[in-house]
Amino acid sequence: MSLLEIDTLAVQYHTLHGAVQAVRGVTLSIERGRAVGLVGESGCGKTTLARALIGVLPRNAAITGGRVRFDGADLLQLSGDALNNYRWRRIAMVPQAAMDSLDPVYRVGDQLVETMRLRGGLTSPQARERAERLFALIGLEPGRLRLYPHELSGGMKQRVVIAMALALDPQLVIADEPVTALDVIVQHQVLRTLRELQETLQLSLLLITHDISVVADLCDDVAVMYAGRIVEAGSVREVFAAPHHPYTMGLRNAFPSLRARSARLVPIEGYPPDLASPPAGCAFAPRCPFAIERCWHDDPALLPTTGGRLAACHRAAEADALRTQAPQAFARLETTGPQSVRPGAPPAGGTL
Amino acid sequence: MSHLLEVTDLRKEYPLQSGLLSAVMGSRRVVHAVNGVSFVLDEGGSLGLAGESGCGKTTTAKLILRLLHPTAGSIRFAGRDVAALDGSDLLSYRRQVQFIFQNPYEALNPRFTILRSLLEPLIIHEIGQSIAERVERVAGALDRVHLNPPETFFLKYPHQLSGGQLQRVVIARALLVDPVLLVADEPVSMLDVSIRAGVLNLMRELSRERKLTTIYISHDLALIRYMCSVTAVMYLGTICEIGPTEEVIEHPRHPYTQALVSAVPDPDPTRPRRPVEIADTVPTPFQLPAGCPFADRCPQVMEVCRHLRPLLLPVDAGVRVACHLYPDSTPRTAEGYGAKMEPH
């Protein structure tokens, strides 16, 4: 059984402009000891999804459907102390820009020890000893426990924050953009540390990022999110080598690679839909060069395709053929613009 | 042959805010943000300035734009000393050299309509005879950056546009005044991945079509590889390697460039990588080491690196490297570093 099973989870934000459906039925599972990357553009709902898992959504957000099972327990039914037993102890989160939330007036070691005393019930000497071991684990000398945040570099602060997440031996760590603010060399080192920890401690890791290279570098599995839905999921090697969903195909061509000689990049024309009024059909259809009539009114479900993969696309069975046409097809859309009018529908200005 | 842009031994120091004690003691600490940068750029060339945060790449750009004054060194544009320009010459320089900054949300006045923001440079530089002609130029510029139909954008405010659209408006504004040199500082790092390629392609087409000379500043080597024919890698205020982009990225010679290139993650998980490991502690730019600035982190450091600063000198294939591993980089005279270079 998977460690974490998310089943058709839906989250809404209540805003002045009405309800925004940020997460629209996400189904995703994370196996024990696996690193899963959740990629998507800003606003696709990846952070909202993560926050919903451990019940730290903002006030104006509410879970409107679905289930989350962690190690057999239904997380969404828990509250108060029962939920607190999961937070940090079994599921730890490294939020975005967490390294900037270290308290500047306390030594980093004291902040780490405080966490373990208050949340883990360790005694001070126990916590101190564990803090030293944690620092060794993340590749910092124990002497650095006595330093203040401003005395550490960005990479070191990020390591401290990761140590904090690991302080109470969680089974699952959720890391939201853990290396985004770091320089590339430091980023590489932090990612490598994270990978080593994940392997040696047999952690499950949910890594949230907009950068598919980071996922390719660190994760076993990947889930691609678009407009509040998972559109494709599977092992990193398979998904990136041979994407089944047109959005993933488009992303691969939109991204410069340092190591491949530069073929012309092809953007994905248009913008994600407004989730205050999500489209009836597939949310990607207006930007998809392969959209057929059915895509405009029938939202595809996330279904198994070949090789244990999942894709939410009516034309997933044709994926191999579509993939070879993808660069030219997306490039054609680049010249004509996104499809604002669906084929067969009355032209703009007509009766609707 | 004269170059369009000639930067020679450029330096910029910032004094550190000092307390009463250090004022009394007479000690003066400075940050060496740019510490002897030299390069030349020919008309129609495209130079990428790569490096990590704090390496001085944005300061170099601001010096070129004359938004900052250098502490020492010179910038010559079309043969003239930029620091000496004033009056109408300075105004003309400000027209010929345009820039695109990282954050399109901050580059446009939030209380101006797009039309007003785009008319302003035409009024300042007295381009166009009548309002009607200027409006027509604005429409043409918006059309060229694929904001169609242009009239629908005239009366919009910046907050009504997406990041990608705003960056296109900023590009249109820069091109309205027919610049010669375009400096872009991280032009797409604020944009979403699927939008980036469109903006980059647009900038590539426009610079080709107008024979623009361009400088791209980015921490992203993949972007620089896509956009630039010449790449300069900066470290702690100096250029440690410069040469044709393909050479610098495919066969990096400086140990820092090697570490930087090898650390970039790749979207293809099957491509093998051989990362070069270096320490993640960056020396601060106010305690510059006496020798090579990279010596403390360099996996191949030698005795000479600790006390003698290497010169940026040609190695092969048009690449210049400042590293003692390449014997030509070791100065034979007491002359300073920052030799002139020809990127082409």
Image (spheres, rainbow, N blue to C red):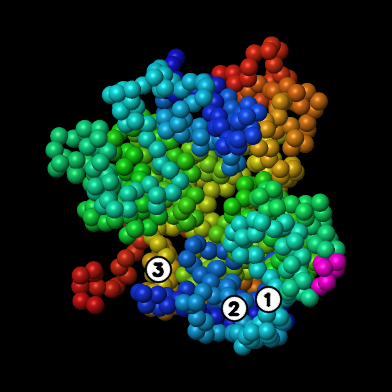
Residue A273 tag number: 3
Please tell me whether residue A58 is drawn above or below residue B307 in the rendered image.
below
Quarter in which the N terminus of chain A is drawn:
bottom right
- Pick whichever, A14 or A185, lies toward us: A14
Residue A87 tag number: 1
Residue A234, x across and y down, in percent = 63, 69
Residue type at mark 1 is Arg
Q: Which residue is drawn at 44% across and 39% down?
A: B184
Confirm or deny contact between disc 1 and disc 2 (CB under 8 A).
yes
**Which stretch appears magenta?**
A122-127
Q: In this view, does A118 lie to the left or right of A240?
A: right
* Circle nearer the N terminus (3, 2): 2
Q: Is residue A133 left or right of residue A84?
A: right
Badge 3 and badge 2 both on one subunit? yes
- Pick whichever, A15 or A224, lies toward us: A15
Mark 3 vs mark 1, foreground winner is: 1
Residue B177 tag number: none
* Circle nearer the N terminus (3, 1): 1
Residue type at mark 3 is Pro
Measured Cα–Cα span from mark 3 to mark 1: 33 Å
Element carrying mark 2 = loop
Callout 2: chain: A
Q: Residue at x 71, y 19 (%)?
A: B330
Residue A55 tag number: 2
